[in-house]
Image: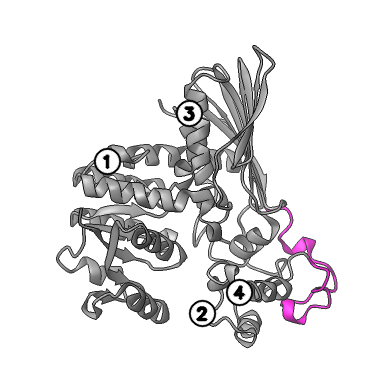
Amino acid sequence: MPAVTLAIAGAGLRGETYARHAIAGGRGRVVAIAEPDTHRRHRLMAEFDIDPQHAYEDWRDLAAQPRLADAVIVATQDRMHAGPAVAFADLGYHILLEKPMAPTEPEATAIAEAAIRNKVIFAVCHVLRYTPYTRMVRQLLAEGKIGRLVSVQHLEPVGWWHHAHSFVRGNWRRSDTSGPMLLTKSCHDIDWLVHLFGSNPTRVSSFGSLTHFRASERPAEAADRCMDCPLKQTCPYSAEKFYLAALADESQHFWPLGAITTEFTEPAVREALRTGPYGRCVYASDNDVVDHQVVTMEFADGATCSFTMSAFTPAEHRHTRLLGTHGYLDGDGRSVRYVDFRTGHEETIDAFGEAGPTAADGHGGGDEALTEAFLAAVAAGDPSLLSSDATQSLATHRVVWAAEEARRTGTVITLAG
């Protein structure tokens, strides 16, 4: 079977990751790219052997051409998803769209309508759906191992350094330039929880705030930049300490270090920290997204779910407890402890997934598995090979927007059936 041809619209860390998985798996071939960063564009042109005439600065220039590939990976910044997704759907490209779909419901609705209207295969990169761990948990639920699912407790441990990197200093630090934390980081988790229950919630509530990473929490001796700060050796958020340690570890060069520099040398890192956003004190940035949030969901059958996102953890796999009428599952992203109430039997069941929890690790194998599923669906012309479509992704995004409205207004939101 010939390889699926791919275009990349937005060749940042996520677009680059999916493209590399496509090529590594032998199912995909990148033939066009649109990326405004000259260094990144030329590097990937060389890596993927892209014809220079099919390399563009702007996705609009790519969309102005006749269709050049079977499918497109849309991985532009969050607030730039709607334009390219709709345009490429109208051109007949199958679409792999980085999450979230879009920052607002009207934009996400326009994307879904374009995908449906043009009958293209469409997937949002909800990579948690595709991990070996998720397949195992879903199978245990389908087999009735714990009876009827009554309640779920789910923790997303973002990690103190990851939160400081991405959501205090990084591209996702502000709601007005990216989106609320629940959307940009945790739409993965809300989608995953709905995937486990097999239905959308009927009511949601939420609480959370920006508690720590703000000026009122700043130590009196702290400087505006970590490089100048007398507290840098003891501060858990010291940019100098963190990024120089990352420089010494090649596995961290692609991410997170690749977000701040293209040259992996100590002088380059120090210059980036002196002049760029990643060197700012976490108490003197312009961030406004929450650093902790709780979402509570109720389903039509009376089942409930609590989701907690927190910056104040190690960066590790999600932790989930699934409470059923006949049993209990306690999972950590790799294995689950299973207790059968009927027999008293207890065992640990392993998903045999080796990948770690972060973007650098491939999200527990989800990045690779999603890419493979998307390419298989395109090659076969069979969207059923994907676990969700445009309509389903839009529905779980609507849960996120409802939860964020509940947090802002202090109300319980009832969702349409």
Which of marks 2 and 4 precedes in the sequence? 2
Which amino acid type is shown beneath numbered disc 3? Answer: Gln
Tell me how many marks there are. 4
Q: CA distance from mark 2 to mark 1?
A: 37 Å
Instruction: Report which residue position mark 3 lands on.
Output: 139
Q: CA distance from mark 4 to mark 1?
A: 41 Å
Instruction: Report which residue position mark 1 lands on.
Output: 383
- Above/below status of 36 relative to 300: below
| Location of residue 92 in the rendering, given as x and y in whole percent from the top left corner | 18, 54
| Disc sitting over residue 262 in the figure | 2
Instruction: Report which residue position mark 4 lands on.
Output: 277
Which of marks 1 and 2 precedes in the sequence? 2
> Tag 2: Cα neighbours inside 10 Å, few (<14), some, or many (≥20)?
some
Which amino acid type is shown beneath numbered disc 2? Answer: Thr
**Residue drawn at the location 47% of the way across and 48% of the way down:** 366
- Above/below status of 309 relative to 243: above
- Do the residues bearing badges 4 and 2 touch, measured as CB atoms within 8 Å? no
Which amino acid type is shown beneath numbered disc 1? Answer: Pro
Magenta stretch: give its range: 210-235
Which of marks 3 and 1 precedes in the sequence? 3
Which amino acid type is shown beneath numbered disc 4? Answer: Pro
**In-front residue for pair 307/350:** 350
User: SS class of the residue under badge 1?
Assistant: helix
